[in-house]
Amino acid sequence: MQADMKSGHALRCIACGAEFGRAGAEFRCPRCGDLLEVVYPAWAASEAQTLVWASRLKQTWWERKLSRHGEDASGVWRFRELLPHLPDWRGIITLREGNTPVFELPRCARSAGVDLLLAKHQGMNPTGSFKDTGMTVAISIARQEGFSWVACASTGNTSASMAAYAAHGGLRSLVLIPQGKISWGKLSQALDYGALTCQLGTDFDGCLRILTELVRRHPIYLLNSINPYRLEGQKTAALELLEQLDWQVPEHIIVPGGNLGNCSALGKGLEELRTLGLIEFLPKLSVIQAQGANALVRTLRETGGQRLVPVQAETAATAIRIGNPVSWKKAVRVLQSTGGRCEQVSEAEIAIAKAEIGSDGVGCEPASAVTLAGLKKLVRQGFVHHHERVVLILTGHLLKDPEYTLKFHRRELLPEIAEDERRRLDPYRRAPLEVEPNVESVLRVLEEAEKTHATE
Ligand code: F0G
């Protein structure tokens, strides 16, 4: 069954409201230079019509789970009524993205002081991060518009994702990354998928500045999250999550903040679900940043969200080492409309939270762990109550940054932190033991471990 809803779309400037059929190379408003967002004028319908759509959509999306067609098997394109209309659905570039699991995190729940804690693991996407959900949409549009080259600046995950989708769709890709500041796992993906990879002696913000200039001078399609089609794909994680929760809205969703595209996308998805009558109220969507990359925290505290306060970013959670976030205005809007909070967490808090998520058998990369560290703060502040349902959005897979994990367990991570913080980390560390190659030695280790476990 098809839900008979048209998704004819326009691009609208978030500041001056001007609407356009197509974007220029930089994806900024040609009139005032601000960000663009995708809007669907056809959705302005009567309340009765909206209710009909809501029940049809839920059923259509559910039925597509039984289909083997690429556009139905994708956890993004399954929700295509809420995505830009493509002339040819069969021409999409898909790696069966989305369809990511929701896990319970019982140990983390106890540690944070909530009764039930869920994690939607976007790191279970084909290239190991949430970027795939947005990439499939934007890169499919790039190919249908006739581009042969695509490009992005990245802290690693966008480049890995873009390179994979470009290779899969027969396009060429250019990656600009900050030299020495992205994890090896992510770099190796871009290389294997065949991207033209340039390491620049600058940070992410510098790479993005150079790319913005480059797309003005060369016909190459920009795939950073300033491209509003990326956010359309990423918003489907909110749709999928609500479907997984039987459309019962959780009180809180917590997401990491870097360039602030993802929180903007999830917020947009939630608002559209409400507009279309699929949910009745919005969860509070909170954004957590690393203390060393806290541009949004400072923007809200120092200007009330009126003016961006850029920072010189530094954090071992390299995915969110961003000081000049492009989508800050969209993020402020989402925080205001959902009533969420923005918090920052220290490097030690991130390391502990990451080890805790690992100890629930789930694991994630450091940037994702800010969500649990932030939740602990929000509980202490009384913003999150123990009986409320909380969902963390884990954005990247544990294996994205094995170096961070190994350094943590080998006591090599964060050499400069204070002694009392170091003592807080120690109980979470599990360095590999060097053991003589015989059964007695291994038995001794096992018995020792059983004793310690009994006293824990
Ligand atoms: N978590 C992970 C694992 C990321 O890779 C990123 C961003 C974020 C969180 C933050 O999301 O930027 O939408 O606020 N990574 C980008 C990249 C910047 O290039 O891979 P955001």
Image: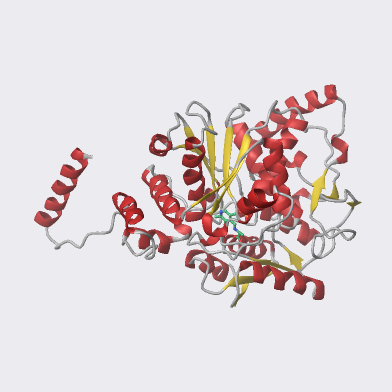
Reply above or below: 304 against 319: above
Tally of marks: 0
- Work out whether residue 323 or residue 236 is closer to the camera in this orientation and state it: 323
- Work out whether residue 381 or residue 215 is closer to the camera in this orientation and state it: 381
- Work out whether residue 203 or residue 9 is closer to the camera in this orientation and state it: 203
- Identify which residue is drawn at 26% across, 59% down: 432
- Identify which residue is drawn at 68% across, 36% down: 338
Give the left or right position of residue 9, taking residue 423 as reference.
right
Could you say where residue 456 lies in the image, as x and y percent from the top left?
23, 40
Reply above or below: 208 against 61: below
Q: Quadrant of ligand 1?
A: bottom right
- Work out whether residue 184 or residue 280 is closer to the camera in this orientation and state it: 280
- Identify which residue is drawn at 84% across, 60% down: 33
- Which of the 4 quarters of the picture holds residue 79? top right
Q: Looking at this rendering, what residue extends furthest in the top direction?
A: 48
- Which of the 4 quarters of the picture holds residue 406? bottom left
Q: Looking at this rendering, what residue extends furthest in the front direction?
A: 302
- Identify which residue is drawn at 68% across, 34% down: 61
The N terminus lies in quadrant: top right
Could you say where residue 10 lies in the image, as x and y percent from the top left?
86, 48
Could you say where residue 290 lies in the image, as x and y percent from the top left?
53, 55
Give the left or right position of residue 10, taking residue 222 as reference.
right
Give the left or right position of residue 12, taking residue 329 as reference.
right
